[in-house]
Amino acid sequence: MTDFFAGISPVTYAPDAPVDQLVYRHYNADEMVMGKRMEDHLRFAVAWWHSFAWPGGDPFGGQTFERPWFGDTMDLARLKADVAFEMFALLGQPYFCWHDADIRPEDDSFAASKRNFEEIIDYIGTKMEAQGTKLLWGTANLFSHRRFMSGAATNPDPEVFAWSAATVKNCMDATHKLKGENYVLWGGREGYETLLNTDLKRERAQAGRFLQMAVEYKHKIGFKGAILIEPKPQEPTKHQYDYDVCTVYGFLKEFGLENEVQMNIEQGHAILAGHSFEHELAMASALGIFGSIDMNRNDYQSGWDTDQFPNNVPEVALAYYEVLKAGGFSTGGTNFDAKLRRQSLDPLDLIAAHVGAMDICARGLKAAAAMIADGGLEAARDARYIGWDDPRARDWLADGTLEQIETAVCEGGIDPEPRSGQQEILENYINRFV
Amino acid sequence: MTDFFAGISPVTYAPDAPVDQLVYRHYNADEMVMGKRMEDHLRFAVAWWHSFAWPGGDPFGGQTFERPWFGDTMDLARLKADVAFEMFALLGQPYFCWHDADIRPEDDSFAASKRNFEEIIDYIGTKMEAQGTKLLWGTANLFSHRRFMSGAATNPDPEVFAWSAATVKNCMDATHKLKGENYVLWGGREGYETLLNTDLKRERAQAGRFLQMAVEYKHKIGFKGAILIEPKPQEPTKHQYDYDVCTVYGFLKEFGLENEVQMNIEQGHAILAGHSFEHELAMASALGIFGSIDMNRNDYQSGWDTDQFPNNVPEVALAYYEVLKAGGFSTGGTNFDAKLRRQSLDPLDLIAAHVGAMDICARGLKAAAAMIADGGLEAARDARYIGWDDPRARDWLADGTLEQIETAVCEGGIDPEPRSGQQEILENYINRFV
Amino acid sequence: MTDFFAGISPVTYAPDAPVDQLVYRHYNADEMVMGKRMEDHLRFAVAWWHSFAWPGGDPFGGQTFERPWFGDTMDLARLKADVAFEMFALLGQPYFCWHDADIRPEDDSFAASKRNFEEIIDYIGTKMEAQGTKLLWGTANLFSHRRFMSGAATNPDPEVFAWSAATVKNCMDATHKLKGENYVLWGGREGYETLLNTDLKRERAQAGRFLQMAVEYKHKIGFKGAILIEPKPQEPTKHQYDYDVCTVYGFLKEFGLENEVQMNIEQGHAILAGHSFEHELAMASALGIFGSIDMNRNDYQSGWDTDQFPNNVPEVALAYYEVLKAGGFSTGGTNFDAKLRRQSLDPLDLIAAHVGAMDICARGLKAAAAMIADGGLEAARDARYIGWDDPRARDWLADGTLEQIETAVCEGGIDPEPRSGQQEILENYINRFV
Amino acid sequence: MTDFFAGISPVTYAPDAPVDQLVYRHYNADEMVMGKRMEDHLRFAVAWWHSFAWPGGDPFGGQTFERPWFGDTMDLARLKADVAFEMFALLGQPYFCWHDADIRPEDDSFAASKRNFEEIIDYIGTKMEAQGTKLLWGTANLFSHRRFMSGAATNPDPEVFAWSAATVKNCMDATHKLKGENYVLWGGREGYETLLNTDLKRERAQAGRFLQMAVEYKHKIGFKGAILIEPKPQEPTKHQYDYDVCTVYGFLKEFGLENEVQMNIEQGHAILAGHSFEHELAMASALGIFGSIDMNRNDYQSGWDTDQFPNNVPEVALAYYEVLKAGGFSTGGTNFDAKLRRQSLDPLDLIAAHVGAMDICARGLKAAAAMIADGGLEAARDARYIGWDDPRARDWLADGTLEQIETAVCEGGIDPEPRSGQQEILENYINRFV
């Protein structure tokens, strides 16, 4: 045992604890919600990068966190893993996630970095087995190192494409080895800084082929998890190709991958793209590509990705309502791609942030489940579209023509009368559950 | 002749006229640019709605314009047409565009409104023939009347779907009759105010079928022009399904229409969606769905659609650079979906706004053509991707696998070295032409 | 009695009513919170303009509401007042607000409009006395009519300045007569569309003198209520001079009015200016100019003023926390400057929207009061600044010089060590109360 | 001589050079514009931090630049200064700017860092004398080190306040010693991350006293340059107290400093605050606090501070139009607080970026001067306000009362008729000069 979390006890469910105690007040892993354990609904994951690798910098200032494991040696990488699993034990969440760059030191060649990676994967694997914490997903960091400054799969230099492909292979292998349930691609540099030096068509083709190779490799090695793409509109690039759910859908259709790849949707990225989180969830569900979520919010008044822990129950409830309507998670889960504020220096902050977030999600899930059970929202929605049950309307949709319909309208009997959309009444309804 | 533009003479090309004269200083219809007349490159169109139908209101105030043709009679509709063609004669632009609602008074039934519409179409047709001004595109206003408050094709009420389909049929017929070169659909209410009362999947299906019917009808009547969709992310709705070019592309792929429908791209809509105008143009071109443009800007500090006449040459030059790279317009053109500021009350403002805009576009076009001729930008871009000419790189892209590539990387020889993206140098280059 | 609200009963407090009943579940006027009746804390007001005068239009569509009182006659103005007071009776809220233009038809001269206004003021006064509903504030609409298109007090035309001054005088007289508790100025057109035709310095001077005249007149007639300015950054103008609380504070200081004028702060306007609502409230309180609130939200994904009823308890709780910390309302209150969505056509929507909003505010108030009572947030804040209790620190602040302090630092003993800001822990704390 | 810029020759004015040569095509230092040398108008300055200290990182990636002077020794600091002055010699711009942290390595105590600082200041002073390059302004970096994470002057910990005060003293001393023409304060961390742990009132008081001390010290040491505050609304903080020009004006009034402190206005910061650059310039001029500019743009589609070199002539022309109308710079100048894109790795990129920017500014200045000379814009503006020359209107403004004016309006003769604001005509006018 390290002493990083000295003095902090495992977090237990204690709904009636005094206000200043660090307990779960709402998250109760074994409590049944809609016939399933809460833990199995929410499938919480801790992100290695923000929780253990991020130093607390921002564009105007450097490191604020002073973690004993910061540095580039294998010993420190193991220390980091030790502390991580100690945190998992304190929180009791079932999953975690990593990039390769979070867990192993980069070395002076691809092969040497690979050796570091494989060694630490084994180290983590042993800990997973001992402790029971599972891997929600693995992913490759193809954006931090300067070699990726102009993109990974979409780089003008094919050597970077190759480096990236090789990295993804190794990360997929490691994910598979650790029985990870998904493999994620976030194309942080797959975009452009300026159109002036960019060939959009060529870069899309590169990205499409890259994704096809990943899918082919998944099948080859027998990886049963989902391949997930995480949309984001911009930042760090001026424009990122995986802008939002609908953009990625078009991309998948173009490259014949819409049945092979699903979405990992983040609240903060939705906001940056001009959407609500629930919009992106509902849209992915409507398109049949919903996969998993990153449950971290952006500040509504900041124009960049603030990656904060969730704290607004009504918003979170609407998100889980869409998740439940989509049938809940299968391989996906609730990852916190959230970082502490850079002033939150203490180990306690790290624990408390996750506890608060898990409680918020639990409240959101329970409210969403109650709404599903009540059925009021779906009943109102169904009533609104009731006209489409009419046989004539069904015919129009099935095989009508403009001419037939125009004749019907002209000959009378059709003069539509607006009906209330009842938005405020439905908003009130939601508020009875949150 | 009406006296609306009394005292204003036809606008001529006079590059050296004194600063206070109302002339074209850059737009010279017959001047050859890249082997084509400037008029044939730019294909300017005046929008009937903003120029003749918009009363000058905004969300906090009513009508400011006092036009003698405002009102709901056929006589006033003809007067409006008379003034419109007088303006076309003053400006000398080759095209115009309309919605049905701009040109005819709504009557008390669908059939009666249709009669008004057909009568005014004939009236306009006669004037077109006499004067030589052509129709760039027609379109249906499926958003202003209260019957469309919850959508047109995507309305929960199939009667509104029917009304909309019938309207599109008649507008397509009229466009065909007037030899219009395109037919446009802008789905101003095809979206939602709140997800709480919305079935996204159902509404997408309605929109998809609706568009298929329009395409089927086009072929049936032998209309040779393009069907264009105009993307916009929001406003008036909270979310509009035709969010941006990539979103519409996915939608077209879903409904098998990507070879049937093209994009009408507006600068202001691009901005609202978080893109630059040139991004949307380049993307449409890369996806093979570029069609036409609405050349009107939004204020960068306003979060709504301000629809202002263009006034920034460097920006306009980048737009036409993409147009030229896409091969120039075929059926498309440059429409000004631009409204006067509501304080610009005078007939002279209406003329001057168009003259200024046409000159800005002419400057942009000439700068773009000069850059194409110089070739410096394309040469720099080609050089940046030169590595992909390497046979090994081509093989990777054609049929490589992650394993093969990983082996190549691991076995050495691949350690990519970043090269400058030269953004500032390329920006300087542009500024030598604008 | 009109039959507009036929079938709707007065809304009562019934916390345990079934989910589909229209009752107050949280708002209980007589319940004591921090030693004061809930009604006296919240001081709810209904806005005449949005609830009774707004026709449901938006920039892309016209009227959707069909109210029997729409029109320009005095009879209809009285009918509108009758319905308004019927709604007040159903809701039981203690206050309402108006613009002159909401309540009387404009006539063909200033004098004639004034006569209409005075007559309807008397009519409303009689109803107020009979029913007990009070006037929170009156205000003048100096933005809708085309004469105000270039501003009111800041118009380039002094005749508009005069018209506006005369209007404000009459509205202040009427507010005084009806025992209104505040008088509000929102300068919707006090700004500019383009700097190119604007003299900022001159327009600020006009606005400053105008406000001084209003303050002078208040004292002259013995009006004891507060003069309130409502900041908004833009819309309808490109830039509005009363941008936000800090901007208005500088303006008040410039014209010597910081002790005479307070702020009416709206959530939606705060958002448009890039602030959270609680920021604007806390800032006004810190500057000693807090007055009243408009409790209506904007959609976070829309770039314009959506004026929606509040529906997010955690946000509303933070707002009332600032209100309570500022000592609560004195003359101010909670006005709903909120409009129904334009699809919400039914009388029931109008009632339900207000009921939902009042319940949300009641929940927010109770949560805020509980946090005040618990004291945890203030204790944490005090602890954070504890170093400033040190005498040396106090001296630095009182009359230190850079040299003295530099000497102290150089000579050692000062090497500050960062301490956690505990943001997540404080956010968790809030969530125990909402 | 280092060999960093090997192969790059001093940049000369050669307007007709071939398109691919690195020359000034518009900036001609000695050319007379409005009776003053162009160099004396523009007063260009290079920023040490972005050009020599910034490593090319962003929130998702680390260092891309590999400069031979990166590191923390005094030898490397001298090498950095050598290269900087070599760049100044190549560019020939008259000024530069620094933060203390840009030019000296931080050491292990305040006193030791001070010794480093003083030594490098002397080193730079010698080079300045030899080469003739002057200091536009100095400033202190009170935001990068972790000790400033919760603010500098506004820190909850008075020891950080002290450290900051001591640092400012030393930076003011150094600026004075080097005959700097201004001293700038940018309060990057003077704001908050969350209101929950912040005492706005107390922090404002700290900031006010801090600024007073700086002003007192300026007078004490006989520094004749201007004290400049650089407004920015947010980033890195959620909210920065120096939000925009109007906010700072109110702050200066509160602490009695409006005649002692001026504004250093940055285009990118104006954009983040929701303003155009020319708005902030015109507002500062109207309030009598205009000082200097940071001429670097933000990307309009990015919500963070991109700090790019200027490249849009029409925008830059409007900015210099306001500068010229304000009488031009006195102590202020044109600083490029602009960083290369992180992909622009080459020494040539650094030179070319500045050359392009200086040329853009020269074009903007010449266009602005031509508009001033023509006088058309000012004439139109004067005509718009002509009504205020009327004696009755002057009286209203001087000492009118609401009653007098209401009587005048009621008794007739006043019924204002709107006049066109001519925005498009004025925009066309501008485009004749750019």
Image (spheres, coloured by chain):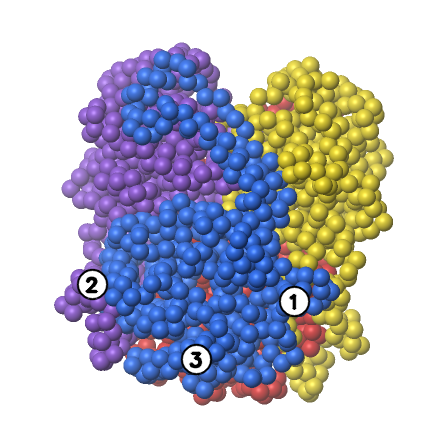
Chain colours: A blue, B purple, C yellow, D red
Answer yes or no: are tags 1 and 2 on the same subunit: no
Q: Residues within 10 Å of mark 2 (few under 14, many from 20)?
A: many
Amino acid of disc 1: Val
Q: Quadrant of the N terminus of chain C?
A: top right
Subunit of mark 3?
A
Distance from disc 2 to disc 3, alpha carbons, whole Å, reads 37 Å
Question: Of all residues shown, which one is farthest toward the front?
Answer: A35
Residue D151 sits in quarter: bottom right
Residue at screen point 33% across, 19% down: A406
Secondary structure at numbered mark 3: helix
Q: Are marks 2 and 3 in contact (CB under 8 Å)?
A: no
**Residue linked to disc 3:** A126
Secondary structure at numbered mark 1: loop
Q: Position of residue A372 (x, y in %)?
A: 54, 45
Secondary structure at numbered mark 2: helix
**Looking at the rendered structure, which numbered label has been put on residue A23?**
1
Amino acid of disc 2: Leu
Q: Are marks 1 and 2 in contact (CB under 8 Å)?
A: no
Residue at screen point 27% across, 77% down: B415
Query: In the depicted view, which residue is nearer to us: D208 or D319?
Result: D208
**Residue linked to disc 2:** B397
- Give the vertical position of B148 relative to A298 (above or below): above
